[in-house]
């Protein structure tokens, strides 16, 4: 077992930089979309929670039905199929055709049974809120099919080392959705003061708001066919599915399907618990917006780096070279952690001003409610990102069974904790309680996954990883102290404070915190001679130099 840090090669660095840049632009536009949506509907209320529940539903159904097959199985199987005489083209067409059929049938059935799905996923006490959520769902549920197309086409591109479209096409989705929200405000803006009144929502308002959300997902998916042609692929439907090894993919997907069913059942518990606070306190919309903020550093850092490493781990696993799989996993964990530790603390310190940007009219109570939920989520962020890359190692090894049982463990722990929140925690703290439950269960899940993958691979450079994490946390101490000093100076905790009462104040305080804490953290890491810092920053700096030359 090598104990020396493995520096990502030029291709991995370039791929990670492309993924990170596309994700950054997409996430910024995602925040713009969330901001416009909340300024339109608010963050707390029956109508806004009805739309949030309906708009999350297609993603939930898609993940249960096909997400595991596409994300966990597709890349390793396509990498192996590349050894075929035709370069895997025939296998890809068959696999994609299977996916399209499953997704199309699923989207149709889900749309027909929209009222049943709303009943299962959320306990809505108001009949008016249930009717509105169902109306939104009829327009949103076709997104299942387009989410699937996007995942299939982008995973095939990733397997062929074309990473850019995966992160850049969601930009188109966000642009279309933002334009839809702008159109909604232009057409219905004069009467939007009644947006919280369930009777205000007529069929044309529902169609414009939810229909443009679905149109954005469709645009994101269909544009990927253009990039397929650029890498020499052309999709031809092929229903001759026997005798090409799809059974192997099916067995692998079966365990992942079970894993995702367990995850989404826990998600239903979460939605039903937080929906009990709808209309009065932080509920579905607040938690989904806080999760959007939580996912920002994870998407830019962890997903970008892990996606590039996943293809290489799959290649090494396909040849039985476990030593290189260990090296890839160790390197990816260390490079991801060196940035995630800083991102977590920066967001914790800046949670209130960040949340203020998504509180309609800079309502202080709504800001505090979202900020508290965000902090509770962030406690589990480093573990969440480490777990993401560890699961990719299992998938690269063709093992989807182990992640199922690890996820079952997490879901049981979380569901018990969430139900305890419902039973014993006051309604105004329900959102925070659920977020803390999710963080705690996620940390335990990551620890269990790390122990198992360590045994499976015969080690992952545990000493190197531990020393790297130790340097990260030592470097975080002066950064955290300076961040807290700034938070006190900006007076985050009081109504009317500069940092939480205006755009300028929120953005100024967030920028100051980010710059000061980053300089302190990076300078300390430099003094500690962290090799992971160079590995993490070299691809980004190289990309910036190329642009400036």
Image (cartoon, grey):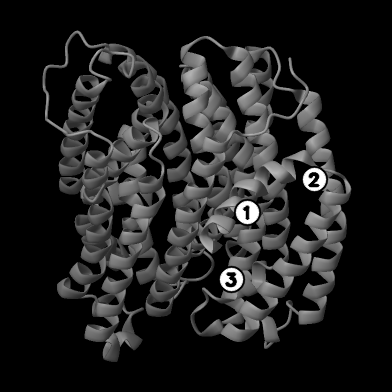
Query: Residue 254's image quarter?
Result: top left
Which comes sooner in the sequence, label 1 or label 2? 2
SS state under label 3: helix
Residue 408, position as x, y percentages in the image: 52, 27
Task: Determine the residue positioned at 28% across, 66% down.
Answer: 176
Query: Residue 417's image quarter?
Result: top right
Q: Nearer the viewer, residue 19 or 56?
A: 19
Which comes sooner in the sequence, label 3 or label 1? 3
Q: Is residue 458 left or right of residue 486?
A: left
Which residue bears the numbered disc 2?
472
Tell me the CA gap for discs 1 and 2: 20 Å
Q: Nearer the viewer, residue 111 or 289?
A: 289
**Dot 2: few (<14), some (14–19), or many (≥20) neighbours within 10 Å?**
many
**Dot 1: few (<14), some (14–19), or many (≥20) neighbours within 10 Å?**
few
Q: Nearer the viewer, residue 75 or 291?
A: 75
Q: Would you place residue 321 above or below residue 166 in this image?
A: above
Which residue bears the numbered disc 3?
355
Answer yes or no: do the residues labelled 1 and 2 have beta carbons within 8 Å? no
């Amino acid at each position: 077992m090598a104990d020396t840090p493995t520096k990502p090669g030029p291709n991995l660095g370039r791929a990670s930089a492309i993924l990170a840049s596309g994700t950054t632009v997409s996430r910024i536009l995602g925040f713009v979309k969330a901001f416009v949506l909340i300024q339109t509907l608010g963050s707390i209320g029956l109508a806004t929670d009805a739309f949030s529940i309906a708009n999350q539903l297609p993603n939930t159904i898609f993940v249960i039905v096909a997400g595991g097959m596409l994300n966990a199985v597709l890349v390793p199987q396509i990498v192996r199929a590349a050894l075929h005489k035709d370069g895997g083209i025939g296998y890809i067409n068959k696999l994609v055709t299977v996916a399209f059929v499953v997704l199309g049938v699923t989207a149709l059935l889900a749309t027909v049974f929209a009222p049943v799905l709303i009943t299962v996923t959320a306990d809505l006490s108001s009949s008016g809120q249930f009717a509105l959520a169902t109306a939104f769902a009829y327009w949103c549920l076709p997104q299942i099919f387009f989410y699937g197309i996007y995942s299939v086409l982008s995973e095939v591109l990733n397997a062929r080392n074309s990473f850019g479209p995966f992160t850049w096409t969601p930009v188109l989705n966000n642009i279309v959705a933002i334009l839809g929200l702008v159109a909604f405000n232009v057409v219905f803006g004069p009467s939007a003061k009644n947006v919280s009144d369930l009777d205000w929502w007529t069929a044309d308002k529902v169609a414009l708001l939810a229909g443009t959300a679905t149109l954005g997902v469709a645009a994101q998916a269909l544009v990927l066919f253009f990039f397929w042609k650029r890498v020499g692929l052309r999709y031809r439907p092929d229903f001759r599915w026997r005798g090409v090894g799809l059974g192997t993919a099916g067995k692998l997907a079966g365990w992942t399907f079970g894993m995702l069913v367990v995850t989404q059942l826990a998600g239903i518990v979460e939605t039903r618990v937080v929906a009990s606070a709808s209309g009065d306190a932080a509920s579905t919309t607040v938690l989904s917006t806080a999760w959007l903020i939580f996912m920002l550093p994870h998407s830019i850092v962890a997903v970008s780096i892990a996606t590039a490493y996943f293809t290489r781990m799959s290649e090494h696993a396909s040849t039985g070279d476990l030593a290189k799989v260990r090296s890839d996993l160790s390197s990816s964990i260390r490079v991801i952690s060196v940035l995630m530790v800083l991102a977590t603390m920066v967001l914790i310190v800046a949670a209130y001003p960040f949340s203020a940007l998504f509180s309609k009219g800079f309502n202080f109570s709504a800001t505090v409610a979202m900020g508290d939920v965000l902090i509770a989520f962030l406690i589990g962020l480093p573990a969440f990102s480490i777990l993401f890359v560890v699961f990719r190692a299992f998938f690269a090894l063709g093992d989807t069974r182990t992640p199922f049982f690890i996820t079952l463990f997490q879901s049981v722990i979380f569901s018990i904790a969430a139900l305890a929140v419902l039973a014993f925690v006051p309604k105004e703290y329900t959102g925070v309680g659920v977020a803390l439950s999710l963080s705690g269960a996620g940390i335990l899940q990551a620890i269990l996954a790390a122990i198992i993958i360590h045994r499976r691979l015969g080690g992952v450079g545990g000493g190197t990883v531990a020393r790297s994490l130790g340097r990260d946390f030592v470097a975080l101490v002066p950064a955290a102290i300076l961040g807290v000093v700034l938070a006190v100076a900006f007076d985050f905790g009081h109504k009317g404070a500069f940092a939480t009462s205006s755009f300028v104040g929120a953005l100024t305080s967030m920028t100051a915190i980010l710059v000061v804490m980053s300089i302190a953290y990076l300078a300390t890491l430099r003094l500690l001679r962290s090799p992971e810092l160079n590995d993490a920053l070299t691809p980004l700096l190289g990309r910036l130099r190329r642009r400036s030359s």
